[in-house]
Amino acid sequence: MNTSLGPGKKSAPTPMRATDPIVVIGGGHAGLEAAHAAFRMGMPVVLLTLHRDSLARLSCNPAIGGIGKSHLVREIDALGGLMARAADAAGIHFRVLNASRGPAVQGPRIQQDLEAYPRAIGSWLEETDITIRQAEAMDLQLRGGRVCGVVTREGEVIAASAVVLTSGTFLGGRLFRGDEVVEGGRAGEAASNGLSAALRRAGLRLERFKTGTPPRILADSIDYHALEVQPGDENPVPLAFENLARRDFRPDLPQVHTHIAHSNPRTHDLVRANLDRSPLYTGKIRSQGPRYCPSFEDKVVRFSDREHHLLHLEPMGLGHPWIYVNGMSTSLPEEVQEQVVHSVPGLEEAKIARYGYAVEYDYVPPTQLSASLEVRSLPGLFLAGQICGTTGYEEAAALGLVAGANAVLAARGAEPWHPSRLQSYLGVMVDDLTVRGVLEPYRMFTSRAEMRLSLAPDTADRRLGDLGHRLGLVSASGQQRMTTRWTRIRQALETLDPDASSKNTPGHRIRRGEDPVTVLEQEAPHLAEWPRADRHSLVALMRYRGYLEIERREAKRLERLEKVRIPGDFAFQQVPGLSHEVRQRLEEVRPARLGQAARIPGVTPAALALLASALGRPEEAAS
Ligand code: FAD
């Protein structure tokens, strides 16, 4: 018998069939990658969204990529996803962040045309037979303890072989500005309340996070003379591998400049004088926001000795009348936002088109999910995006892809895909979320990865291409392109750097600090024909050869821990010698492997040794 999680309206029983579609709730960045991944794997897909015209909306900053985030986007691309190609197609300002540092920590960031981005995604969706429906999911249907359908506000039941929930900031969403508090998922869009109650009734724990957004101002009300111009890079670096393969990538859209402004002591005095009107400081918002992306109020309070804060004025599109004031996320009242904006040189006459606000929403603490992003207590339900405690388009999209693929595997009764943190940033994120949990909205940083050099973004295709093909996410031609690229790079490496110890090879000269461009011009002039990205990949392999070897050895050691499986029904309570706290943590997270157990906060090396012993593998924890 089918049961609905909530009191909802009566509906006909819905038998689960493997041919029932994957139902994706949400048409944001997570939902679209999930739906597209499931489609590529050959499943019928139904996607529900609150507003059909808000698919792939960039709700906050009009940019994709950046440090850590671009690493995820390249991995999404290597797995056949949409985001990188759309970001390249809609890019109006390309800039590599951290350009002076090593390739493993550089981050291409692409300013987007707000309308071109969803248009690009929409054009690929049209090539699929994904059914997109404007409907609010209110409840889930269960059969035999497994999620087998979605109940809409109208009481319709949509049968599902698995459900992917990607509702962003919409569940229990409340928007704050000064004294005003209204229900909403983001500006101009209503919140969704039914599902939170349904999830709670099913025994899931929900908590609250918050995030915020800055004011948008009219582009023609700015005095640009007072601002510093920031042009895009002369040689734009795209995110998608198919564009990196071009010898000379040029963006499709005309390019624009962004500008830099600075706040000053007067701006900060205004903020301080009005802190008692900010919902963050009056106690109206109690939940945690992202520390690394603080509100302007927080910046002024926490960095009280700073006289200036940087503000990036970013166009929201070609011909779009608004400018996004990056760095001034605030929920102060409208009249205070006016004063604060006008105190900034260049913005004295600026007209605010939309005031900043904060949003507080329900999320599901992700330690309740397994590494396939399936809710452990509700098989058949997968979560991705902001609903599981992340922030950012890129994080959402990456999780969407994992959840979508795993939903298909579950529907087919196949083994789940648990992305490994030794193989990808995607794996790092999934592991951090499901094993360590979150205390604040999670965003990706390169520092979260132990194997930063091995996970350099240019190698995402080599690391994930075959896996993507095996899963059915990457076409044969896509896989072939990746194989050809890396075969060529490896062959060149064998010639130019055959042995780490030989002297005077091109590889050795590069490691000694000679300019790689000159070395390659002298020793391998034919490489000038290669795409720039391939030359960079080759040089990185030569330059960091020793470090890569060290990482490879460390990876081997960690892999041994990862290989020790912990049975699903393992009784952590019975392990002799473990403290009550450690047992509780292990029961809560239920790690599937010894390596995961080692990363749970509070699991000490001594506790790990006891666990390894109980699993009959004492030698693994000793290394
Ligand atoms: P979203 O893109 O929010 O999409 C959610 C989708 O779910 C929508 O299509 C909606 O219609 C649908 N939906 C919701 N409930 C239902 C339902 N019951 N039935 C059917 N459909 C439903 N990120 C940053 O990195 N930095 C920031 O500073 C930042 N600030 C932000 C400020 C604001 C005000 C907001 C709203 C977001 C901000 N973000 C920020 C977050 C960024 O927008 C999200 O991380 C990203 O869009 C999340 O993607 P998602 O797919 O999880 O959800």
Image (cartoon, grey):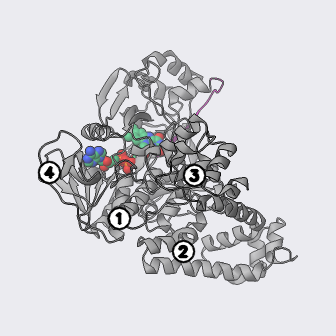
Q: Is residue 334 above or below residue 186?
A: above
Residue 13: x and y in percent read 14, 54
Mark 2 or mark 3, which has the lower sequence index? Answer: 2
Residue annotated with mark 4:
156
Q: Label 2 vs label 4: CA separation? A: 47 Å
Q: Tell me which segment is drawn in magenta.
A: 304-314
Q: Quadrant of ligand 1?
A: top left
Quadrant of the rendered image containing residue 309: top right
Pair 2/4: label in front: 4
In front: 81, or 37?
Answer: 37
Mark 3 residue type:
Gln
Residue annotated with mark 2:
245
Residue 116: x and y in percent read 36, 58
Pair 1/2: label in front: 1
Residue annotated with mark 3:
596
Mark 4 residue type:
Glu
Residue 390 visible in image: no
